[in-house]
Every structure is written in C-alpha cells, then in structure tokens.
Amino acid sequence: MDIRSFVTASCAAGLLAAAASAQSLNIDFGDGAGTPADDYAGAALPGVWNAVTAPPFVVAPLVDLAGSPLDATLVWGGGAYFSATEPAADPPHNPLMDDGVGGAGDVMSLIQFSGLQPGNYEITVYGFNAINPRELTSVILGDFGDFSVIGGEWPGSLIEGVVYTVLQWDVSPSGVLEIGYVGGVWGHDGVVNGIQLRRIVTGDLNGDGSVGVPDLLLLLNMWGPCGECTSGGCPADLDGDCNIGVDDLLILLANWG
Ligand SMILES: [Ca+2]
Ligand SMILES: [Ca+2]
Ligand SMILES: [Ca+2]
C-alpha cells in the first residue's frame, strides 16, 4: 500500500480526528435589504451569512460558513441600522451592500469578536453608505493598529478600497478581535455593511479556515511533481520543493484542526 492509499484508507476508517470548527465566517449587518444567500461570496468566501439585526450591545451566536455553531461570539456597540429605499448597489450585492449599521460621528464604534481560534486572520470589512455614498468610513483594527479608509459612490462592482477593505490581524490566545469604525473625515459617521473573517492556516487548501479531510484529499489529488510551482500554481507544495509528497503531507497533518 503506498502512502496515498494508506492515508485515504485511514481517513475512511475515521482514524483522523475531525477538524475543529472552521474559523471562517460571514457577517451581514442589517436585513432591511435582506441577507445574502449562502452561495454569495462577497469578496471572500461563500457560505452562511450571520444576520446581525439585534439592537446594539447584544451578543450574537455565530455559525461558520457551513452553518455549524461556533464558540465565537460577537458584541457590537454601533449606531442605528440603515437601509436604502431603492437599490443602490447592483445584484447580487444588494443584500450585503444596501443596508448596514451606521456609526456615531467622531466617536469610534466597536465590533468585538470573542472566542476565536488564535492565529492570523484575513478580515474583509464593507463600508458603503447606500443612502449617502459620499460618506467615508475609517476601519481600525485592535489598538489603532492596521487601518483603512473606504467609501464613495457605488463603483459598479465590489472594488477594494472603495466599498471594502482587506486587513490582517494576529488573534492572540485571548481569542479577541476588535474592529473599530468611525467617520472617515470630520462630520461623517462611517458605516459597516458586513465583515468576512478567514483564518489563514498552512495546509488550508480549500480556504475554509481549518485543515481537515477536504484539504488532505486535495493534496493527495495533486500528488507528485508540479510544473507550475513558481507561479503559484502548486498550492499543495507546502515546502516549496516543486513536488507534492510526504514532506507536504506531514506539514498538512502538523497543522490539522
Ligand atoms: Ca443585509
Ligand atoms: Ca480547509
Ligand atoms: Ca513539496
């Protein structure tokens, strides 16, 4: 039995523990314009969108992209929800972009995740005011760490730097991630339409935020030499030697969960 057959058989026999809950999730603030369908990816990954519609300061139970409950929770202390009376974005973006929650002028509003699995996260934040597109939003991570200013007229599609920004943050063992937002210039309130979190893990070949059986099967399917390793065409080559083999398998298994 070669190594691939052995690993596949081990999987089938359930000898490998199930992956921990994937730590990628989608958040949609406000349902005045609806909530995105599960197959809507926004600028990141498709999956179940957590609809946050409760008043401020309420903890929302969260689910991952597959709809499985997470230990992670969200608390936010923003302003009022808003919703466009007529479509402002183009399909299929309206349920995400045509509503959201507004800020409180020059007082920073805070969205706090707790209970996240520690590690590096890609954080996509949407800030398009469908009622007043001139509104600019500053998005700030942690203690005035990474930040970005977004906003402006609907550009016809999801354009990074206009309707959304992508930031990265290392979540410590505390499991806490804080995302602040405030008016991008004096006199603006700032808005947030939604947030997508994707945990970045070596060996996460399908990008769902964890390393598990789907990633293992992808690696096994690509087993052997790869010719496009210098142009990013060989994602399963985890040690960069232009071959997918046992070393890559061991790296993947070392990051399991
Ligand atoms: Ca919405
Ligand atoms: Ca994965
Ligand atoms: Ca390799």
Image (spheres, rainbow, N blue to C red):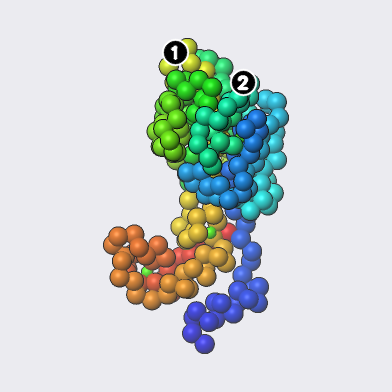
Decide which of tag 1 and tag 2 comes sooner along the chain: 2
Dot 1 amino acid type: Trp
Q: Which mark is residue 79?
A: 2
Residue at point 64%, 66% (across, down):
17
Is residue 7 rendered to the left or right of residue 31?
Answer: left
Residue 111 place in picture, x, y as percent: 58, 30
Q: Is mark 2 within 8 Å of ligand 1?
A: no
Q: Which residue is drawn at 35% across and 63% down?
A: 233
Left or right, 103 with respect to 185, comes to: right
Q: Is residue 101 visible?
A: no
> Quadrant of the rendered structure where residue 152 is?
top left
- Amino acid type at circle 2 is Gly
Q: Which residue lies furthest to the front in this view?
A: 86
Q: Residue at x 37, y 65 (%)?
A: 234
Q: Position of residue 42 (x, y in %)?
A: 51, 43
Mark 1 — residue? 186
Q: Give the number of the disc on residue 228.
A: none
The residue at 61%/20% (across/down) is 79
Up the image or down, 159 lies above or below 10; here it is above
How many numbered marks, from 0 up? Answer: 2
Label 1 and label 2: CA atoms lie apart by 17 Å
Q: Is mark 2 on a helix, strand or loop?
A: loop
- Along the line of sight, which residue is nearer the eye, 30 or 125? 30
Q: Quadrant of the C terminus?
A: bottom right
Query: Counting other residues with Cα less than 10 Å from the Cα at mark 1, is it few (<14), some (14-19), or many (20 or more)?
Result: few
